[in-house]
Image (cartoon, rainbow, N blue to C red):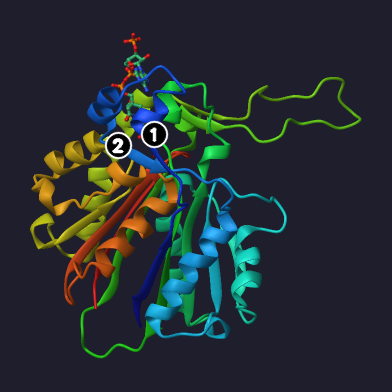
Amino acid sequence: MMINITGTGRALPENIVTNFDMAKIVETSDEWIRERTGIAERRISTGDTVASLSAKACEQALEMAGKQAEDVDLIIVATCSPEMLLPCAACQVQGMIGAKNAVAFDLNAACSGFLFGLSTVYGYLQTGLYRNALVVGAEVLSKIIDWTDRSTCVLFGDGAGAAFVEAVEENGENAGIISISQGSDGARGMVLSCQERKLSNPYIKDAIGEENNFVHMNGQEVYKFAVKQVPACIQDALDRAGLTVDDIDHFVLHQANVRILEAVAKRLKVDITKFPMNLNRVGNMSSATIPVLLDELNREGKLKKGDKIVLSGFGAGLTYGACVLIWN
Ligand code: UT7
């Protein structure tokens, strides 16, 4: 069975917030943000939700794949910033697009979420339990960011990307997802965290938990984790695929920071031009970065049949993953 991406889509809020706009909110500068991160502007929701952005991205992916909403077997929304704990975002999306035959659930692996969603779908489709799936990475991070903390608020943006993934019978062509490598390191998880509601019930005197439920990050520890773990994970996925870095046409990585991407390229001894980037325009959208970038490349005609692509995500958890696929 070949597991192919046959449609992609994306949706971004219209509201553009530049580094100059950020400098009006916190003590920062365009120069500092660009130099340390590569980000110039990001999209910030003024009403869009994880579910509404996801639904738009899914509709585009379905249209590209030539499928109707009723054809969808499975919807996975990877997110760490849903509007609702219940119902999950994927069920909201199912209702919005009318995918009445689909099974729908959310998955949280932060910035690795799209990759982990794709690997989950890969497993389902390989067993034959389902024939196709919509995998979405979607975030409205702006509501869980501390807008008084300059070390985090300048980094993130809102948006959603989707891929329609189908299982097709082998036809002698080498295509689709070839290999996957994933890992998690919960022991180091608190370097990038966000508290949910406090534990509070009639049996405890004082509520237990953080006072402030915003994103907290030790940027340097996350940086060190990423530049060490991501190249190793990509190398493992390549080894499993029987390929080398030289075989790969595009390295589509989680868009956290241009310096991380440059360091990964250097460690892998790959020219940075093989690492497409859009974080200057959209910032770090956690689980949405990979599918949004993939859709941009796809719609710009930059992905050719037979191109070998590495997708790789990394972030809170800590979690990391890479996948090798052949575009068709
Ligand atoms: O999806 C995964 C998400 N995580 C990441 O991408 C994080 C990876 N880490 C990084 O990209 C970097 O660690 C950051 C970009 C977050 C920070 O860069 P850094 O070079 O590690 O800076 P730093 O935290 O060491 O801070 C250096 C200085 C500090 O000032 P002092 O103590 O030297 O006076 C900070 O207070 O920069 C200051 N600073 C800022 N200055 C202007 C921190 N944020 C800002 C800011 N504007 N926005």
Mark 1 crowd level (few <14, some 14–19, many ≥20, 10 Å Cα): many
What is the tally of numbered marks visible in this picture?
2
The residue that label 2 is drawn on is 39
Quadrant housing residue 229: top left
Ligand 1: which quarter? top left
- Name the residue furthest right: 202
**Horizontal placement of 287 versus 264: left or right?**
right
Residue drawn at (31%, 30%) of the image:
223
**Horizontal placement of 315 versus 214: left or right?**
left
Dot 2 falls on a residue whose secondary structure is loop
Dot 1 falls on a residue whose secondary structure is loop
Label 1 near ligand 1 (CB < 8 Å): yes
| Lower sequence index among marks 2 and 1 | 2
User: How far apart are the alpha carbons under marks 2 and 1?
Assistant: 7 Å
Q: Which quadrant holds the C terminus?
A: bottom left
Q: Which quadrant holds the N terminus?
A: bottom left
Above/below status of 215 relative to 27: below
Q: Amino acid at mark 2?
A: Ile
